Amino acid sequence: MANQIDLKKLPPLKALKGFEAAARLLSFRQAGQELNLTHTAISHQIRLLEEDLGVALFERDGRAVKLTREGKSFYPVVRSALEQLINCSEILRRTDKNQSLRIQAFVTLSIRWLARRLSGFKSQHPGFDLQITSSILDGTFDEANEDLGIIYAPEPVPSHLHWVPLFDAVLMPVCSPDLLKGSTSKLTPQELLKLPLLKVYTADGHWEEWFQSVGVFSEISRNSIAVDTIAIALEMALDGEGVAMVNGPFAESDLKAGRLVQPVDHTVKAPGGWGVVCRQDRKGNPDVEKFTAWLLDDVAKN
């Protein structure tokens, strides 16, 4: 039997939330706004915590605050404890077998890659409920609300997340054959600059990376159109409105059917790649394992 915990030694638990927010934001006022409390209430929580611990956690200079040495030491412990409570609570909340597996994926990947494959998964796993969220404004996995993410990560994910690679991010320009005015020959990179280039806000550097890989450092913004997803850029490319840059297998069916062509025979691998991500404490979940295994098998077959 486990030893009894001396609960009397615990600091004021309610104050820990205020401390975590204030230490992270370095502002009592912003912490109060985040927690729907007044600035005074946060100050009171911090004061109670400091009195209980017998040390100052913040240095105050008017409205500005900064962590003391003790505060800097205490913060990661508090943060880790709160995160563990949240993560374990989420696992318990989702023990209901009728819950859907929540999957977060980029809009382009959802529309032009994942959606076309889900019928295969459902045929293998009837009765398995999926919930797809296809909005990722900053490319970050929403670990608090989603079980799995299928995302592009240009850099390694944080250590508290589990990462399974799916495929490389290969940059390749594509356009409608109509945009080339019937030409059957490939263009040079310099000739490509004369066409309307479709840029994506969230992948703004991909055109520059591609051109620089072939030794072209010209300004491209003067002959470009900016949109917010690769999916929109591909639709415009299909309509002959310009040349889209893809960073994954999102134009394969259109290329095979001849609706899109590759105007220049050159591809380049972008940093990082596409993969499946989840919290480390979720990687052993049967539903997470089942869906991830199916994804890997589908990628291997195609």
Image (tube, grey):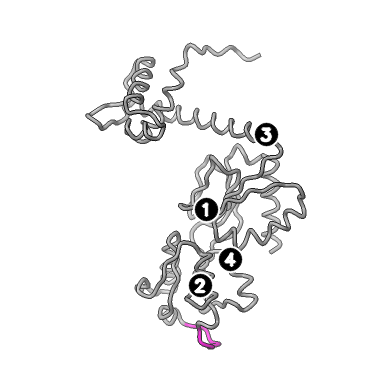
The residue located at (57%, 76%) in the rendering is 260
Looking at the picture, how far across and down is residue 264, in whole percent?
51, 78
Q: Is residue 16 above or below residue 184?
A: above
Number of the label disc, if any, that sits on residue 236: 2
User: CA separation, marks 3 and 2?
Assistant: 44 Å
User: Which residue is denoted by mark 3 in the rendering?
Assistant: 95
User: CA separation, marks 3 and 4?
Assistant: 35 Å
- Magenta stretch encompasses residue 182: yes
The nearer-to-camera label among 3 and 4 is: 3
User: Which residue is denoted by mark 4 in the rendering?
Assistant: 250
Q: Amino acid at mark 3?
A: Thr
Q: Earlier in the sequence, mark 3 or mark 4?
A: 3
Which range is magenta?
A: 180-187
Between residue 169 and residue 24, name the one nearer to us. 24
Number of the label disc, if any, that sits on residue 135: 1
The nearer-to-camera label among 2 and 4 is: 2
Q: Amino acid at mark 4?
A: Phe
Q: Is residue 252 above or below residue 189?
A: above
User: CA separation, marks 2 and 4?
Assistant: 14 Å
The residue located at (58%, 30%) in the rendering is 89
The residue located at (52%, 79%) in the rendering is 263
